[in-house]
Structure formats: structure tokens, C-alpha cells
Image (cartoon, rainbow, N blue to C red):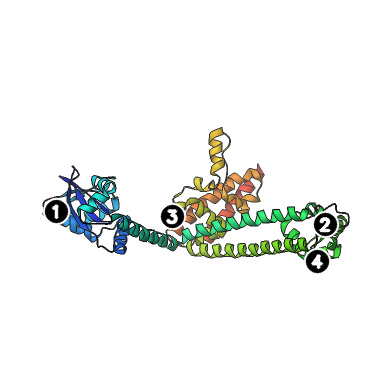
């Protein structure tokens, strides 16, 4: 006869094929201890209750068991060599425990199963979060998400400030497309009547000719008048944007530091920010390390890839790795080959980092640079 074994917050249980409870071992009453045991089971480590129950059943003549988890079955098979352990998910025990937990709880003397479930699940959630935070690659994912949100927020605020100040001095938008110069000028000079050529040149890197054009435009502007209150508020908004930009830079530096710790090869090859984005898109460093180079090449371009498959258009040649200078600054016709070469090196770097292997970042980067030079040279000679 084969017995089916599974576990829940109450303990470890064995049922026969007819669904009759054959034997069980209760967990201690302390929710923290129960959570610890269930966490061990999730990692494939048998509890003492598993061992005790199986030992008891073997002494009664039983030798064939099913469990729902492969690693758990393998560990128990090492200890109980004369017994047979089969993996069956879900098995009879698991289905009964999940479907009739309250009835089984009452049968073995538990009065408030719901309260126990809440307490144990709360502790398990905390344990899971603690483990996740301890995994530095998961931390990188969270921080890169913050960086992306900061970029979006800064960009939105900057555009809104340009539109707002444009009501007062609309001509400035055409003369100063660069956001940083625009914000500096408005912060330092305020109202348009202060836009004199000599003042403009001391604040922003602008030619004499352009500075004079801005001064003339300010003198004949068709924009609305702003008073001191308008000026003060808009300058406060700009100060906030500048502070957010400083925070963004600190966050990027923090990502670089994290990447040095967890993925030094990847960081050396593509930089901290691109490396972090790749880890985030893959779902973790281990997940990135398992990916083939062809998948890494288009990470971040999933929408374009699905659209290409649907419409039979050309698939994208690159995803987030397009941000790498070697791809972004190369002629368009070379980008596909360069992206393939980079993705291949990224795959190697990620595997080295995931396995805590030797540092080969400098070597991988040098090999990639040689490959890029070769691609450009071969293409130009045709």
C-alpha cells in the first residue's frame, strides 16, 4: 500500500488511497516554530516531524510513500534507503489538507485554525521578505525601479516648468532646448527683463550671438507679465527639480556600488545602470545567467518583439542594451551585429557573477571592443 504524505500548519500527515488519516505528527503550538518548519519544507529540508512519522510508518511495515516536493523526497530517500519515495503533485494528502483543513484540525484537537493560519502566514511573509531583501540582486531591482521613477518625475516636472515659464517668455523655449541651461537661466534671472546678454553668458554655456538673440527676444516678448509671486513660486519648483536631480545621481552611484558587490563582471562590461536594468528585466541575476544571448539581446523590447511576431514585421535588434554607447553611437546598419556581440559577452559575465566565479570583466570588455572594431572595419571594407 502506498501512503501519501504532506504537511500544513498543523503538522505532517499520512493518508491512504481512500483518504483515511493513517498517522500524523503535530507541529509545536508556537506559530514562529511552525513558520520555521514550513520555511524549511519550502527549501526542501525535511522536518523532524517528517522523519518521526516515516520512521513510525516503516516500523509498522509501510515502505511506499508519495510526497509533493522533489527535493524533500530526495532528502528523505537518502535517510530511509529501504523505503520508496515518489513525487506526486498534488498528492492525496495535500489535496485533503488544503480542502478540509478545518475538519482535520478539529479532529486532532485544534480549536482556532483560522487564527493559527493568520499568525503563521504573517511570520512566513516576514521571513520571505527578509530573505528577499538579503538577496542583493533583488535589492538592485527595487533601486533601479526608483531610479526610473525619478527620471520620469524629473522629466515631467521639467516639461511642466518650461510650459509654465513659457507663458511669460515663450521665445526662450526655442533658443534654449537644453533642460539644464533652461532651468539655470530661469532660476538665476527670474523675470524676462533680467535676460541681458552678459548675465546669460555667465550662467549658461551659450555663444555671444545666441545670448544677444535671447536678450532681444526678451525685450520684444509677446508673453504675459509675471509678478514677484509668480517668479518666486516657479523658482522654488526649479530648486525642487535640482534637488531631485541630485538625488537621482546619488541613487545611480548607489546602484553602481551594489553592482560592484553582486555583479562586478557585468558592471565592468556594460556599466552599473544598464547591468541593473538587465537584472531587473530578467527577474534576478540567476535568471539572467540562465538566459541565452539571443534573449538578452532583446530584453526590454518585448512589446516590439510581440508586435513583430503579430504583424510579421522585422523583429527588434536590441532592447535595453541599446543604451550602451557602442551600440547607440554606431551607424544604424552595424547595431544588430554589435548588439549580438555584446549580448554574448553579457551572458558570460552574468554566469560568472551568478556562480561567484573569477573576475574577467576587463578581459570581456577588451574582447568586446576588439569585436566592435572588427565589425566596423569589415563593414567599411565592403
Q: Mark 3 highlights which residue? A: 286
**Contact check, label 2 and label 3, Cβ < 8 Å:** no
Measured Cα–Cα span from mark 3 to mark 1: 40 Å
Q: Which of 258 and 55 is in front in this view?
A: 55
Measured Cα–Cα span from mark 2 to mark 4: 25 Å
Q: Nearer the viewer, residue 312 or 171?
A: 171
Q: Earlier in the sequence, mark 3 or mark 4?
A: 4
**Contact check, label 3 and label 1, Cβ < 8 Å:** no
Q: Which of marks 2 and 4 is nearer the N terminus?
A: 4
Q: In this view, does 118 lie to the left or right of 365?
A: left
Q: Mark 1 highlights which residue? A: 58
Q: Mark 2 highlights which residue? A: 225
Label 1 sits on a secondary structure element that is helix
Residue 257 tag number: none
Q: Which of 69 and 290 is in front in this view?
A: 69
Residue 89 on image: x %, y %: 29, 45
Measured Cα–Cα span from mark 4 to mark 1: 88 Å
Q: Which of marks 2 and 3 is in front?
A: 2
Label 2 sits on a secondary structure element that is loop
Amino acid at each position: 500500500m502506498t501512503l501519501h504524505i504532506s504537511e500544513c500548519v498543523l503538522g505532517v500527515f499520512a493518508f491512504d488511497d481512500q483518504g483515511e488519516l493513517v498517522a500524523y505528527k503535530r507541529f509545536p503550538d508556537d506559530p514562529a516554530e511552525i513558520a520555521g518548519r514550513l520555511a524549511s519544507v519550502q527549501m526542501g529540508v525535511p522536518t523532524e516531524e517528517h522523519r518521526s512519522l516515516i520512521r513510525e510508518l516503516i516500523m509498522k511495515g509501510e515502505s511506499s510513500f508519495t510526497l509533493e516536493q522533489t527535493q524533500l523526497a530526495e532528502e528523505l530517500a537518502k535517510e530511509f534507503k529501504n523505503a520508496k519515495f515518489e513525487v506526486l503533485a498534488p498528492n492525496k494528502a495535500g489535496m485533503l489538507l488544503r480542502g478540509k483543513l478545518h475538519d482535520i484540525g478539529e479532529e486532532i484537537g485544534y480549536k482556532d485554525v483560522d487564527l493559527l493560519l493568520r499568525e503563521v502566514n504573517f511570520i512566513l511573509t516576514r521571513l520571505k521578505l527578509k530573505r528577499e531583501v538579503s538577496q542583493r540582486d533583488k535589492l538592485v531591482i527595487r533601486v533601479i525601479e526608483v531610479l526610473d521613477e525619478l527620471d520620469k518625475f524629473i522629466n515631467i516636472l521639467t516639461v511642466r516648468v518650461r510650459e509654465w515659464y513659457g507663458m511669460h517668455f515663450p521665445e526662450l523655449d526655442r533658443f534654449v532646448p537644453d533642460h539644464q541651461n533652461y532651468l539655470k537661466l530661469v532660476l538665476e534671472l527670474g523675470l524676462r527683463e533680467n535676460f541681458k546678454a552678459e548675465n546669460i553668458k555667465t550662467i549658461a554655456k551659450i555663444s555671444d550671438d545666441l545670448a544677444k538673440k535671447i536678450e532681444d527676444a526678451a525685450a520684444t516678448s509677446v508673453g504675459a507679465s509675471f509678478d514677484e509671486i509668480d517668479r518666486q513660486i516657479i523658482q522654488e519648483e526649479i530648486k525642487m527639480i535640482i534637488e531631485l536631480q541630485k538625488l537621482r545621481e546619488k541613487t545611480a552611484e548607489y546602484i553602481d556600488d551594489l553592482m560592484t558587490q553582486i555583479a562586478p563582471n557585468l558592471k565592468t562590461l556594460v556599466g552599473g545602470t544598464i547591468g541593473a536594468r538587465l537584472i531587473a528585466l530578467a527577474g534576478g541575476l540567476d535568471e539572467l545567467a540562465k538566459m541565452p544571448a539571443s534573449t538578452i539581446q532583446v530584453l526590454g523590447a518585448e512589446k516590439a518583439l510581440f508586435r513583430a511576431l503579430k504583424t510579421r514585421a522585422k523583429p527588434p535588434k536590441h532592447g535595453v542594451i541599446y543604451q550602451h554607447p557602442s551600440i547607440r553611437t554606431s551607424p544604424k546598419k552595424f547595431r544588430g551585429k554589435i548588439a549580438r556581440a555584446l549580448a554574448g559577452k553579457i551572458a558570460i559575465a552574468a554566469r560568472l557573477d551568478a556562480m561567484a566565479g573569477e573576475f574577467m570583466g576587463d578581459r570581456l570588455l577588451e574582447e568586446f571592443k576588439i569585436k566592435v572594431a572588427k565589425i566596423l572595419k569589415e563593414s567599411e571594407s565592403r
